[in-house]
Each structure stands twice: as C-alpha cells, then as structure tokens.
Image (cartoon, rainbow, N blue to C red):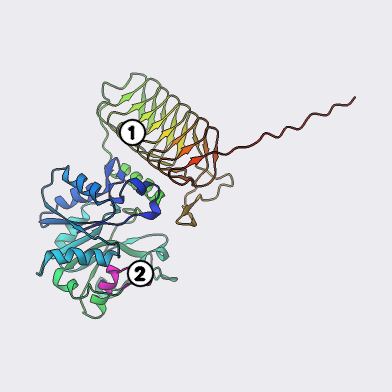
Amino acid sequence: MLLAAGKGERLWPITETIPKPCIPVLCKPLILWHIEALERVPDIDEIIIVVGYKKERIISLINSIQTKKKIRFVDQEKELGTGHAVKKALEKIGNGNDDILITYSDLFLGDWQLYSRLSDLGGNAIVGAEVPDPENYGVLYVGEDNLLEKIIEKPSNPPSNLINAGIYVVRLRDIKEYINTPPSPRGEIEFTDALNKAVSEGGIPVSVVTLEKGLWIDIGLPWNLLEANRLALDKFLVSTPIPDTVHSHVYIDGRVYIGKNTVLKPGTYIDGPAYIGENTRLGPNTRIRPYTVICNNAKIGFSVEIKASLIMEYAKINHFAYVGDSIICDHVNLGAGTMIANLRFDDKPVKSLIKGEMISSGRRKFGAVIGSYAKTGINVSILPGVKIGCYSWIYPGAIVAQDVPSHSFYKVSIKPYITPIRTEE
C-alpha cells in the first residue's frame, strides 16, 4: 500500500505543478522507485496506491509503464491524514489474514532490498531510522525483545535518535480493529495512533527493524530532494560509455551517466558523480560540478556553471549563468548572467521560508528553488534560500532577496543617487 495522496505544501513551489510522488530522483519519478522495488518481492501480489492531490497525473504515469503486479488505485477524496488513507484502502481489501506492507511514497531509500527483507520477516513490524533531529519526528520507544512500546510525536526530550521511518508491515486482522481512531490535535487521523492502540490495548507485538544510517530520506522539504539525488548518485549511478555526440574536447572525470542523443559541445567539463539525461545540450565551455542531475531535454548554454543541483526537464540555463545547490523545475528559463547564490554572506546555515516560518536548512550551502515555467531576465541575482513561484517573471537586473509568489512579475526599481563632485575654486 503506497500512500500518495498528500499535497506536499512544504515543498512549494515544486509541488504546485508536480505531485510529490512524481518529483524526480535521478530523473525518475519517486513513486517508480517504490514500484520497481515492490515488483521484485515475490510475495507481493497486488499494489494499492492511495491517491488524492493531482491524482490524474499519478494514475497516468503508472498506466504508462509496464508492471508485473496488479495495481489498484484508491481515491482518498479528502486529505484527513495517514490513518484515513489506510482506512480507505482497507475498505477495498475486505477481511483476511493477509500481511500488508504500507509505505509513504515520499521516502527515498539507499537500500531497496528492505521490502524483500520485510516480506520474509513475518508478523507485524515497523521500520526505524536514526536521524540527528528526532524531536521533529515520531520517535520509537523500543522495549524488550526489540518490540515497539509506543510512538510519540515530536517529544521535547526524545530517548533516542530512532524515529518512525513511515514503513510498516501489518496483519490485516490485527489492524482493522484499531483503525477507527479520533483525529489528532492537528485535526488528522494518524495511522500511528492506530498502531499505538493495537500495541497498548490489543497486546499485538510489533517488531522494530532499524535501517542503516544514511539510507533513509523523508522528502518533506526542498533541500531533502537534493539529499535524495545525492544518495541516489552515490548508491545507484551507473556510468555510460561516452557516446558519439560528445565532442573530443570534452573532459569527463569520475562516474557520469549520459543519456541518448545528448550533445556535449567543446570545452565542456564534467566532474562526477553526475547524471545527464536524454536529448540534452551542454556547452560550449559548460562546467558541471559533482552531484549535479540534469534531466531530459534541458539546454545548458555557453560558460554556465552548475554545482550539486537538480535541473528538471526542458529547463534552459543560458550563457554566463551560475546555479549552485539549487532546484530548477521543468520549463524554467534562466536569462543570461543569472546568478544563484548558495552561501550566506555571514557563512551561517541558509534559512528558507516554509509555510510562513523561517526554517534552517542545516546546510551551509543552499541556493534557490524555482518553480515550473518561471523565467528570469538578464543579470538577475537570487539570494540563498529564496523560492520563486511557478510562471513568475523576474525583471532584468533584479536582486531577488525574498520569495516570489506564483504568477507574479518581480521588479525592483532603484533610482540612482548621484552626488555631484565638489571642486575647490
């Protein structure tokens, strides 16, 4: 059961046009990573995807691929929480003794064999992951024999760094009795409340399976998407032979994937790991630095430098531009000389405005997030942590120091102040 109904509001402006399960990791929609992993598990006979926000795009994507397993869609209709999503799906299953693997579709794993190991485990289980900031998650309290005692959401003094990774195996008959729980303080029906109830009231044993450190990413904030692509480059990137469309005066160092019909013009310099999609044009004299992902049909112009960024399909980055530690969504056009700063002047961690609150990214270097179909004029400067909404236009020469709403025209007019020079008579 893949839970794929949420809006992903904290990922704005990315999710304004792209549903969260479809955002790309190594240019592959996130949900396809899950489906491909689930298809390798022999014991799984059906995949149920709970959809809601932009469900048509998710359904269209899944219907466009060939799958080995039966796939069924369940419309959550109203976003009332993970518990409500699971309940809607359980209504379509009926009764029985089946084991159900439940996972959030906005997770990225560095070890997709986890699903097979969970299938072999037998019985109820929850996956835990160690993180540096457990107070921001549901923390697992683990008792004797490595069994779950309870899950506490965002405790002020967590007993450990082990948090709920959002992956469960539950026996249908064990969970159905407890799925009807009241809304939480934030007004949502939480699946973790049902699991807590099953453990405390039903005495149902739930094993805790701990993931290896660094192999789990919850893509809930924009910079998490950069981290997921970095993990994918480290774990899953396979270099390709240099195609005939690469000019002889191109320098490639390290592991680099180059898609079909991609043209690399003279003077282009690529430091791996890096991923370059199909039908892409780079150069001349383009520099691609490590941990950059450029998706299909993108065009990167003369003397452009890109560092550790995600460039989505059909994006155009014109000459003399710099893009550092940023996310550039599909069909964005960056005018010549556009500069995206990724380092604060005071060298402190970059902050970004998330749902009205300034949040630290925890990163010394983080650039901008530019939504689909936005464009900048020439010589635009964008400060670290800034987000530009979809379809917005940035006036030439502007310095963008704050978030720009979608469908906006951003222009900063500075009247020149000229002081006459006084000369002695």
Residue 5 image point, x, y percent: 27, 57
Q: Does dot 2 land on a helix, a strand or a loop?
A: loop
Residue type indicated by callout 2: Gly
Q: Is any part of residue 49 visible from this angle?
A: yes
Residue 259 image point, x, y percent: 26, 31
Q: Residues within 10 Å of mark 1 (few under 14, many from 20)?
A: many
Q: Residue, x 26% and y 26% (percent of image)?
A: 261
Please tell me which residue lies in front, 204 or 72.
72
Residue farthest toward the bottom in the current orientation of the protein = 201
Please tell me which residue lies in front, 91 or 155.
91
For the record, the magenta segment spans 183-196
Residue 411 image point, x, y percent: 54, 38
Find residue 235 and report its image quarter.
top left
Find residue 389 and report its image quarter.
top left
Q: Does the magenta stretch include residue 167?
A: no
Quadrant where the N terminus lies? Answer: bottom left
Nearest to the eye among marks 1 and 2: give it: 2
Numbered badge on residue 187:
2
